[in-house]
Image (cartoon, grey):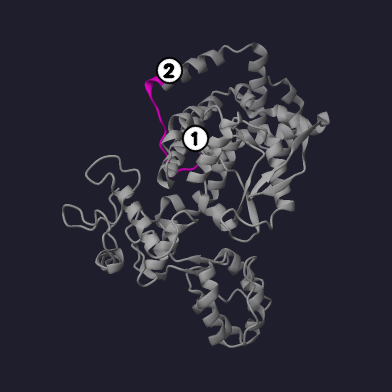
Amino acid sequence: MARKSPHPNFVEYMHFIANHENYRGMPDLMKDDGEIQWETPSNRLSGKHKDSHQRRLEWWRRKAIEVGIDPNTAEWISRTAKLIHPTKKKPCSVCGRVMDLRYAYPSAMLISRIRRLSYVDDSFKLDPNEHINDLLKRLTGTYGRRVYSDLKKILQTKRLIPPELPHTLDAWLKWLNDVYVQSQPKTLSPGSMSNAPDRLDGFHTYNRCCRTTEDTGRTLDNLRTYATDRRVFEFWNQGDWIAADRLMGQVRSNFRNESCLNGHSGPCDADHIGPLSLGFNHRPEFQLLCSACNSSKNNRMTLNDVQYLKAVETSGEEIISWHSEALWNKCKGYVVDEETALRLSKLLRDNRHTVMNILKRLYEQRHYVFLATYLELDYANYDVSFLNLRVENHKTRFDKIVRKHRGTRYASEQAARRCRVAFQSLVEYFQKQTRNIYIVSTDEIEAQVALVLNELDGSPDNVLALDQRIGDLLEDGNDDYIDNEFRKIVSSIP
């Protein structure tokens, strides 16, 4: 399908940015035909400009240092892009609508809070693309001074509680622009997401107004499935998932208000240092990251993460699962900076898609028993606690894991649910229609898969009968019934 021509407003904006002093020295600015090279994707593998992405990344690194931002800190590149942008606004490449680059538009959270105000009825339209300044003006214009009494309640976040301000529009607008918008609260969203160094100005070409309809990777349906992508893969990873889950619960209960690894105040989340979505093991160890840092890390590793995981390996601990170990061992030695850490993360993500594709093929051939042997169901037989659990240097620490054999019924319930959710999530993973993935397929891989399928087709009668029983359960569709029946058969799975 032919690409749409950018809106005239965006074309004018491109020339403005390309000629602006703030972007002087940007590598590979123009193509051979004189057109502005606006995009430099990281997956460009050939051609004259195949290294433009890396050269621009180095430009952004130098620019960050120039403006006083440490490129080794969280979100350094997005903060740099926002700081140097000359107008803090940009038009959408699709519709031409100019939007604020800052967090200035109501999120679903804020819209929900406003809807819950007793005097706000359905006649008051709430548009997620309306600037917070304009929204406040409409609210006070429609409902009067009583709105000011509720602003503290609807704008409050865990990190920021609005001060006591005069009940005047000017006072609140000044605070919103000088303080609130700058804090990037969860109640607000930016007009355009950061995208340096892929785009010349450091921002997505689609603004908030068109992104969910024009960017196939950001449609609402796809956004909802990102959590599924991460959740499904964790079932097929090695490691003590019971201990890891229990420790994560302990962090949420007891250490949530500890400070973040990157120096920010809490509340903090428990971050898997080696992301499960990249194939790393369930390990009962977490580092504490605030929500913003945890979100920005996403399913990728930093240089510090890689260095730490390599150090853990030297102690003899297995850190990565069978399906990703070879790739990790082959590439970990090449990680020397943030860019190479990101490249390894992307390779491991591609490997994840390839692994999931093979598991799906086994699932489609109804070899459920064989697949279930990778779910490490034996861990369900034990309850765990941690002796002298604490936080040191923003990481969880304990002296010993105490394991206690748990009752048969509870263990079978845990194992049954793990089987059911793992199989159902495997199907959900491939229901995503617009998935930008790369699956490795070679003659050698195809030959090995064919060999495995042929071997499994000749499984003993008792295994084939169990495959048939599991398949019938999964087709039933009632989760409670599936779990109940799985409890009767999990002990039969080798």
Secondary structure type for disc 2 = helix
Mark 1: amino acid: Arg
Q: Main secondary structure of the magenta part?
A: loop
For the residue pair 396 and 473, the one nearer the viewer reads as 396
Q: Place residue 96 in its image quadrant.
A: bottom left
Q: Position of residue 485 (x, y in %)?
A: 74, 29
For the residue pair 30 and 398, the one nearer the viewer reads as 398
As drawn, is 292 to the left or to the right of 196?
A: right
Mark 2: amino acid: Ala
Q: Position of residue 125 (x, y in %)?
A: 54, 74
* Residue shown at 65% from the left, 59% from the top: 267
Secondary structure type for disc 1 = helix
Q: Residue 300: tell me if it is visible.
A: no
Q: Evaluate if marks 1 and 2 touch, with contact meaning CB atoms under 8 Å apart.
A: no
The count of marks equals: 2
As drawn, is 74 to the left or to the right of 464?
A: left
Decide whether residue 340 is among the magenta residues.
Answer: no
- Label whose residue precedes the other's in the sequence (1 or 2): 1
**Label 1, label 2: how many angstroms apart (C-alpha)?**
20 Å
As drawn, is 18 to the left or to the right of 353?
A: left
Q: Which mark is residue 352?
A: 1
Q: Which residue is mark 2?
A: 447
Q: From the viewer's perspective, is residue 355 above or below residue 344?
A: above
Residue farthest left in this picture = 33
Q: Residue 41: tell me if it is visible.
A: yes
As drawn, is 290 to the left or to the right of 358?
A: right
Q: Position of residue 386 (x, y in %)?
A: 76, 40
Q: Position of residue 43 (x, y in %)?
A: 34, 43
Tell me where the magenta segment starts and ends, as one range. Answer: 431-444
